[in-house]
């Protein structure tokens, strides 16, 4: 797997449809990259991989460093080597930042990685509470939200081409972790203040799947999945 | 790339939406497998790769052996090593055969390869006529159909999980080529008579993309793409 590969374990669609049991280990996942996002066993919180370290932002508001044997049902990861870098030194909303990232990307028709580090004026996140079987649909889970102001940290995540909505989330799917590792989650919206933006173009996606019967033998109901992903992510 | 990888170059969705220019070469495509399907520059005919040889079944009804420098906009290919093999020695319609293939597969939630070789009671195919820019939508192209009876040949293709409808074709996408290399195309329906069925399970999909500006800079309209794929494939 080269510099320009994005590796995805499981799919957002299957996760949304109930494939929430942790199957792959963090240890195995980290062999595919040093920079990524995902969720943990039972959709327990928001996974952030930064500089080869894996963290979970929990629905309780805590951020926990993850051990190698903890399991995930879904994640995307890459070895981060930026192709494009720029700085932003003013208060800008996420929509504006996203437009600039898309302009920097090689193509809207390819996957890309985005890393934004520095000071954020506001950061609004949510985190999934751990579910237990029998799982309800992801879109029906109530998720606590948290907001921080004037916070130092890093936004980590990926852009997916619109055609991949279903297996991934079309557009940006990004998580956040603060520099002091006390605040994080799935990013809803934000304003940057003084940040470095780094963008990586991927030429290919490696789509891997859980090997366990809980995934292989599942009967998924994907009938409304595109809308459920749009609502939930 | 291991025995259990399926490699896809481009996507069905982008092809349907107008990414019909040949970009990758047959030579490069064949480095990813010895067994596959696709279409050629300008959606010219139906590509069949069997035993590392590439053929095009044209809308004229001809089957042509392809040279290494001919270009394709879309294809899926793998190194074929069957995990499951069975024989069928009676007249059975494709729906029945497909049910047996799905039963043999490791999982409906993974990609699979299917190769059916022997005598077919009937084989009904179509082949795309070559288009020239500006391309109309794939679903609007009129495609000649051909039927053969009591024909010896090989059906080649892949099963994709339903969640991948859009980038691939959900369910079976299969092409056919006769043993004497005079008849072939995109399979619409068939009856087997006396065949060997071989099935390969894939644990991962490697999704690659054209590197050319004609793809990278394209503005695709995917608004009705799932339905267009269902109608056309």
Image (cartoon, coloured by chain):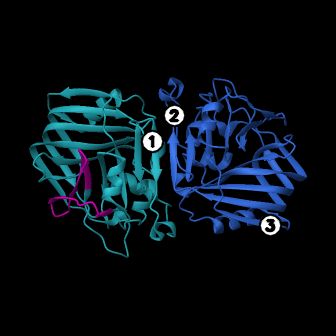
Chain colours: A cyan, B blue
Whole-Å distance between the Cαs marked 2 and 1?
9 Å
The stretch in magenta equals: A47-71
> Would you say residue A78 sits in the magenta stretch?
no
Q: Quadrant of residue A161?
A: top left
Q: Is residue A169 above or below residue B92?
A: above
Q: Residue furthest right?
A: B150
Q: On the rendered image, what quadrant is the N terminus of chain A found in?
A: top left
Confirm or deny contact between disc 2 and disc 1 (CB under 8 A). yes
Disc nearest the viewer among 2 and 3: 3
Q: Which residue is mark 3?
A: B88
Q: Nearer the viewer, mark 3 or mark 1?
A: 3
Closer to us: A224 or B61:
B61
In depth, the one of A118 and B182 nearer the eye is B182
The residue positioned 37% from the left and 70% from the top of the image is: A136
Residue B146 lies, with reference to residue A45, above or below; the image says: above
Horizontal relation, residue B116 to residue A54: left or right: right
Q: Nearer the viewer, residue A70 or B147?
A: A70
What kind of element bears circle 1? helix
Let me know if marks 2 and 3 both belong to one chain. yes
Label 1 resides on the chain identified as A
Residue corresponding to mark 2: B220
């Amino acid at each position: 797997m080269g510099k320009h590969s994005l590796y995805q374990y499981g799919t957002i669609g299957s996760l949304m449809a109930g494939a929430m049991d942790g199957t792959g280990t963090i240890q195995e996942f980290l062999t595919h990259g040093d920079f990524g996002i995902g969720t943990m066993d039972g959709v327990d919180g928001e996974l952030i991989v930064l500089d080869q370290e894996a963290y979970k932002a929990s629905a309780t508001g805590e951020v926990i460093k993850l051990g190698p044997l903890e399991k995930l049902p879904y994640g995307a990861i890459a070895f981060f080597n930026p192709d494009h870098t720029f700085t932003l030194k003013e208060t800008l909303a996420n929509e504006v930042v996203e437009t600039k990232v898309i302009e920097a990307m090689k193509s809207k028709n390819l996957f890309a990685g985005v890393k934004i580090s520095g000071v954020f004026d506001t950061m609004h996140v949510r985190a999934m509470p751990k579910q237990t079987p029998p799982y309800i649909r992801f879109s029906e889970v109530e998720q606590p939200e948290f907001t921080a102001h004037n916070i130092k940290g890093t936004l980590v995540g990926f852009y997916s081409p619109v055609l991949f909505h279903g297996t991934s989330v079309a557009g940006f799917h990004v998580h956040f972790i603060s520099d002091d590792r006390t605040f994080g989650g799935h990013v809803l919206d934000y304003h940057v203040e003084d940040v470095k933006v780094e963008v990586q173009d991927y030429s290919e996606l490696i789509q891997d799947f859980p090997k366990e019967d809980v995934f292989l033998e599942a009967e998924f109901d994907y009938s409304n999945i595109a809308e459920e992903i749009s609502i939930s992510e």
